[in-house]
Amino acid sequence: MLRKNLINYRDINLISFFNCGIMYFIINIYLDNHQSALKYLQDTEVTLSNIFIMTGNFNIRDNNWNSSYPHHSMYTDTLSEIANSFNLNLLILIIQVPTRYTDKLQESNSVIDLMFLCANIEEFNKQYNFT
C-alpha cells in the first residue's frame, strides 16, 4: 500500500506491507539536481521503524560506491546519516556495474542507483519448506 499519510513528498514513495503480522516499509527515492528529497528527509523528522529497504536514483556520484569515480560528494554523508537513522546499510555489489551510462565523451559512466538494506530483520531470514 502506498503511504502518503506518513511521507508526502513528490520524489519519495513509501510502500507498506505485512509479513508475519508486522508492518514493514520500502522507500523509493529520486533525487533531482538540487537533492530536494534528501533535504526533505533531513529537515523532516521521519520516525519510521521496520524499514526493510531504501532504494532509488540518488544522482550522487561518489567513490564510496563507485571505485572508478575519484571524488567524494558532500551529499554522501547526509544520505548515509539518513540511512543510518533508518538502521539501513548500503549494499555494495561485488561486481560494480554502472547504472548511468553517458553519451558524452568527457563524462564517464557511473553508479547513481543505490540500495540500502536492513539485514537484521529475522522474519526475512526464515526459510519455509513447501511441499
Image (cartoon, grey):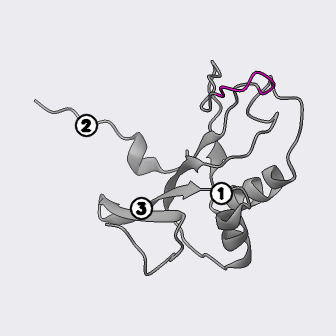
The residue positioned farthest toward the left in the image shown: 131
Residue 85 appears in the picture as rendered: no
Above or below 47: residue 2: above
The tag on residue 128 is 2
Pointer 3 residue: 24
Q: Earlier in the sequence, mark 3 or mark 1?
A: 3
For numbered disc 2, what is the local secondary structure? loop
Residue drawn at the location 65% of the way across and 22% of the way down = 96
Pointer 1 residue: 32
Residue 95 appears in the picture as rendered: yes
Residue drawn at the location 63% of the way across and 26% of the way down = 98
Dominant secondary-structure state across the stretch colored magenta: loop
Residue drawn at the location 69% of the way across and 26% of the way down = 109
Q: Earlier in the sequence, mark 1 or mark 2?
A: 1
Q: Amino acid at mark 2?
A: Tyr
Instruction: Write the start and end of the magenta stretch as one range.
Output: 102-107
Q: Residues within 10 Å of mark 1 (few under 14, many from 20)?
A: some
User: Residue 113: x percent and y percent?
Assistant: 60, 40
User: Residue 117: x percent and y percent?
Assistant: 56, 46
Query: Front-most of 56 and 89?
Result: 56
Residue 37 within the segment the image draws in magenta: no
For numbered disc 1, what is the local secondary structure? loop
Q: Amino acid at mark 1?
A: Asp
Q: Nearer the viewer, mark 1 or mark 2?
A: 1
Above or below 128: residue 31: below
User: Residue 104: x percent and y percent?
Assistant: 72, 26
